[in-house]
Amino acid sequence: MLDAIGVRSAEELFRHIPNELRFSAPPLPRGLSEYEVLQLLRRRAGENTPLSRWNSFLGAGCYDHYVPAALSSLVSLPQFVTAYTPYQPECSQGILQAIFEYQSFICLLTGKEVTNASLLDGATALGEAVRMALRLNRRGWVLLADSVHPEYKRTLRTYLSAQECICEEVPRAAAGTLDISAWRRALSREVSCCVVQAPNFFGLIEDAEEIHRLCRTTDTLLIVVANPLSLALFQPSGDLICGDIQPFGCGVNFGGPGGGYLAASRRMIRQLPGRIVGRTVDAGGNDAFCLTLQTREQHIRREKATSNICSNHSLQAIAAAVYLSLQGSRGLTHTARQCVRNTQYLYRKMKGLSGVTLPYGPGVFHEFVWQVARPAAVLEALRRKGILGGYPTGKEFPGLDGGILSCCTEKKTKQDIDAYVSALEEILHGGQVRV
Amino acid sequence: MVDRFVFDRYSGSEAPTYVPDSGVPDVSLTDIFPRKLLRETLPLPDPGERETVRHFSALAANNFSVDGNFYPLGSCTMKHNPRLHEQAAALEGLRDLHPYQPEDSVQGALGLLYELERCLCAITGMDYFSLIPSSGAHGEFTGMMMIRKYHEQRGVKKTHVLVPDSAHGTNPASAAMCGYATVVVPSNSGGCVDARAFSRALNEQTAAVMLTNPNTLGIFEEEISELKRMAHEKGALLYYDGANFNALAGIGAPRAMGFDVMHLNLHKTFSTPHGCGGPGAGVVGVTERLRAYLPVPRIERRDGRYSWSQGSPETIGTIRSFYGNFLVCVRAYAYVLRLGGAGLRRMSEHAVLNANYVQRMLKEVLDVPYDRACMHEAVFSCASLAGRGVRAYDVAKRLIDYGIHPPTMYFPLIVKEALMVEPTETESKETLDRFIEAVRAICREAREEPDRLLRAPLSRPGGRVDEARAARALEVKWNPAAGR
């Protein structure tokens, strides 16, 4: 090869790079054998305690659902794992159809007409949704429910910090849900969009349709952040619906990758960010798929694109499609119902514990917040008993002192929940934590 | 028989039993929730496990992939993805972790991220990296937001960003998301940024210059030090788009070239798989003076223990949920450990050698618009075939018949009928020779039988896919009414 090119060494190919810009090699240790790397990573893995070794009630935006074995096997197929974006439809029909089916599933769940091939995560999907709303009605005011996931709220603020717009938080009602009168006061024709989360950060089911009706009076768009698994049981609402597909077979992965989804009405499709798979035919008249409306995207539209997004989370989108296909309507309903049952059971048990306050009602999907006098000490005492009790909400929500957000997925059993409650009882009343 | 769609079976299997009945008392949803909030029907199919496995296995088989095909897609660095990475990412102790677990119980994960950050600093010369950005474009957004904050904190009003006319589309799109206008700088006859035009475009209102080096023509910007001097003189920062870092990973550090902020695509240079379009990771590196603006959270190491930190008060803030694509970082870490410093250098040398070989061997049949040694990718023009009515598009489609994934087409925008070939270091001479022979055969065909080319791929029974029709029809989901 060197002869063909006409150089004596590969080194010569870099001779046009000035010497002072080069080094002989990066200052890293020598390369390791495959076995050594695996041993090293196993050691790192051994320094962690995975969820399987805890009785975990952590949720708060990342949920420990069961991932079917068939899903892990299908999503590891190298033809999915090692392909890139299906720019060339003639050699990517399988990927394109899988993503088209993912889009179809998201539309069926959300009741919307269009969606894209995925975004990075739920928080950036919210950022994109709000930017989309600002483009759609060219107004400059955003109303944000304070009961949206704190990381989503902060991400949204970063996404809006370079935009000419005002983002105002609307406080929740005493019941933890949307305060319709506060929203009525805050709404005006200057408001581009309202952002609510349903179920909200505290797990409470919201009547988003009530806000939606209000929004229609000022031609304001309603953006709903929705856990897509909750849509198996609850009515979707909103002009734009977005969130994270993590509950659909992605696993917890220390927070990533999951994947973002964003669904909208058909009339909004030209403002939708990201790749979209559309249906068409080939020269032989057969059904076929390809990426479509690419003129919205950065590689064509550049600074006028709807978003800068290029790489997305397609493999997670395919995982979600596989998950929904494996579960089917029956499996998904069963899973969502078991989440509700388990959570109701824990809620009722907690209600009977002295020293525990339940600030809000039982109208929750699969997590709820409870309060205790010394949450950090309680969580630590639980941890020593092998229990991850939940996510402390105190830092993020000063009004909810001592709050702990606990989640029950379908994986929890009566024994797990009973063990949690008796451990808590022992901690609160066995003198381990002074309350 | 495989179902055409997962939606073809609405009354198939029974509910799967993936988890046991939890044993808690049943509840009635209408006792807890107002009926109006409950969903009446859930219109999902029930194909069951057997049909699902058959269906998606059939879909997977109907694609090109790096495992199955040579995939010289320029700018995307479609190299072999070692299986070691997949095994590492599947370790329960790395995969089955919740982002809000107590720090004590995730010391290995925090340590791994911390170490990976140190490795990336060693490779690039940068002082800090944030591993949170989840794609190249997300990294650009993050980097440009830091640049914006940097100027704001200094009370300087900046309005625009310079990008070369050969830049990736994400550059101007990311700049726009950060509130900056884009000023395009033309390339000179050598394919590099025109230093005089650059100097004219640059002024006190220039916030940053976004460059990828080597640029998208596969050419090293030799005047980079001069460009840097001019930019810094006007108070503009230099942003390095790491999409083309495969050419340089073991050769030289962007820091030495004067870059202040950069991103790396772990899914390109660091060989994490592309997964049909993602997930990737677009980790961002900065020099000391931008440290305060890094997104949060950060990881700190004190007395051998790792912990989360909320960074400095000047941080640009949160850019997504949790800590980015952790499992992508695990794979990249495995890759860096495996190669080491010398291995990374060999990697870049082979990538550049392979690209130059392809460029040299195809010179006789295709135009090389900038005829000089290239770096990791070679850009060709198919303009000379236009007389026969053959376009780059047709050449690309014909390659599918040879089992080769088409190169990137019509990019960079400044080359007519462009084909951008990035062979990567992991391909053998035999594979490159087969590719070269295929392109030569296609060029012969373009002269002798151009009509055949216009119908390619001929090996696919239905031929070409009608992309224009998709944009008119805008059918983006299954239509239950029509059963299709």
Image: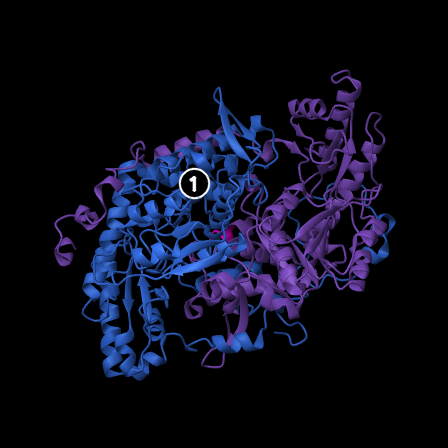
Chain colours: A purple, B blue
* Outermost residue to the top: A431
Residue B336 seen anywhere in this rendered image of the structure: yes
Residue B448: image x %, image y %?
23, 83
Q: Is residue A169 above or below residue A294?
A: above
- Find the magenta span and give its range: A73-77
Q: Residue at x 62, y 57 (%)?
A: A131
Q: Residues within 10 Å of mark 1 (few under 14, many from 20)?
A: many
Q: The disc numbered 1 marks a residue on which chain?
A: B
On the image, the x and y values in percent for residue A390 come to: 69, 33
Vertical arrangement, residue B484 with respect to residue B210, above or below: below
The residue nearer to you, when weighing B452 against B118, is B118
Identify the residue under disc 1.
B285
Amino acid at dot 1: Gly
Magenta span dominant secondary structure: helix
**Does residue B353 sit above or below B292 in this rendering?**
below
Classify the position of the C terminus of chain B by image quarter: bottom right
Measured as percent of width and height from the top left, residue B241 is found at: 40, 50
Kindly state the secondary structure of the residue where label 1 is placed.
Answer: strand
**Left or right side of A4 for B3:** right
Q: Is residue B250 left or right of residue B91?
A: left
In the image, A116: left or right of A395? left
Q: Foreground: B461 or B65?
A: B65
Instruction: Residue A119 in the image: state x and y as whole percent.
Output: 56, 55
